[in-house]
Image (cartoon, helix red, strand yellow):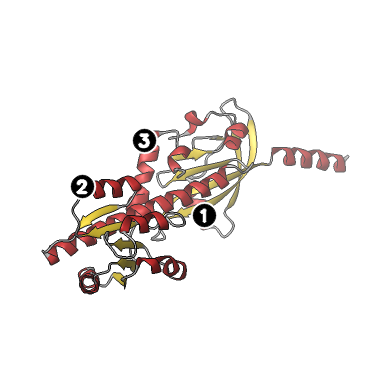
Amino acid sequence: MKCVEALYESEDVWKNHCNVLYRDVLKINSIIRILHVDDDEDFLKITKKMLEKKSGNLFQVYSITNPLNVDSLLKETHFDIILSDYAMPEMDGLSLFKNIRQYSDIPFIVFTGIEREEITLQALNLGVNNYLLKSQIITTQFFYLIRIINDIIKFHQTEILLEEISNHFEQIFNVSNPIRIIDNNCDIIEVNNAYCSLFKVKKEYILGKKCFQIPYPKRCQYKCPINVDHKKKNPESEYELVTPKMESISSQMKVTPLYNSLGETVGCIESFMNTSDYKETKLIADRSEQT
């Protein structure tokens, strides 16, 4: 899996923003759909009742006794996680897992009464998310199982989220327009190569500085674009900027806010367009008309 960490050359910046993702985005608010596979019908009924009740009805458990029916069921219905017994007449739990992994990365827990070290090691080496033993202490067992399921779902959602963000950022940073990303503290956390080329600065010199410090405005009339520009209907602004080598650049900047899952602003993406050549051409044309 590609990771957003690759987009950050500063380890501290990456850690800080990874924490924001975990704190603000990864919240399980929707129903978790669980597919439980076990040849013991009585245990299926107990598990369904306890998981749904003890989770406050945040879990929906769908129970089946035949693992051979799992493939067709997964094609028709969305599930968030699978609980599977190990020893079943038609197919053992690990064979079921290997079969599912050919087409899906859905989280998978082996939930069995068989306590054999070689099977446990085989399961974990194959990549199952957890190997849990059925217990005679029903209440304690299911509270523990609920916690395990929640942790696995959160971790799985994290992987999906990071993959989506990575793909999104790659698309953004592969465009030809200069782009930089800032957080709510107005700190620059990432820029693309086009940005460095336009303003003639190195990335390591930029990261961590305030957005209104780099590049240098001739006259800074704002505290930070994140607090100003994106509140407009058309968040575009013209700025006269100066590079570290004191070269003047006319630039149009467009601001796109970044939100977390609660709708709160956590930063913004700024896209720049060099308008210096356009202005120079227009100035020459205006002078020609006057003569």
Q: Which mark is residue 117?
A: 2
In front of the other: 184 or 108? 108
Query: Compared to 184, does 201 lie above or below?
Result: above
Asked if the residue under mark 3 is in contact with the one under mark 2, i.e. CB atoms within 8 Å, the reply is no
Q: Residues within 10 Å of mark 1 (few under 14, many from 20)?
A: some
Q: What's the CA distance linking mark 2 and mark 3?
A: 40 Å
The picture quadrant where one finds residue 132 is bottom left
Q: CA distance from mark 1 to mark 3?
A: 27 Å
Which residue extends farthest left? 137
Q: Using residue 217 as the reference point, say whether residue 37 is left or right of it.
A: left
User: Is 239 or 20 nearer to us in this picture?
Assistant: 20
Residue matched to label 1: 230
Q: Is residue 182 left or right of residue 38?
A: right
Where in the figure is residue 14, as x and y percent of width and height?
39, 39
Number of numbered markers: 3
Q: Which residue is mark 3?
A: 12
* Residue 225, percent from left and from top: 50, 47
- Three-letter amino acid code at the position of disc 3: Asp
Q: Earlier in the sequence, mark 2 or mark 1?
A: 2
Residue drawn at 24 percent across, 46 percent down: 118
Three-letter residue code for mark 1: His
Q: Which percent across, then down, holds residue 241?
A: 59, 36
Sequence-wise, which precedes: disc 1 or disc 3? Answer: 3
Tag 3 or tag 2, which sits nearer the N-term? 3
Q: Which amino acid, by three-letter code, is at mark 2?
A: Glu
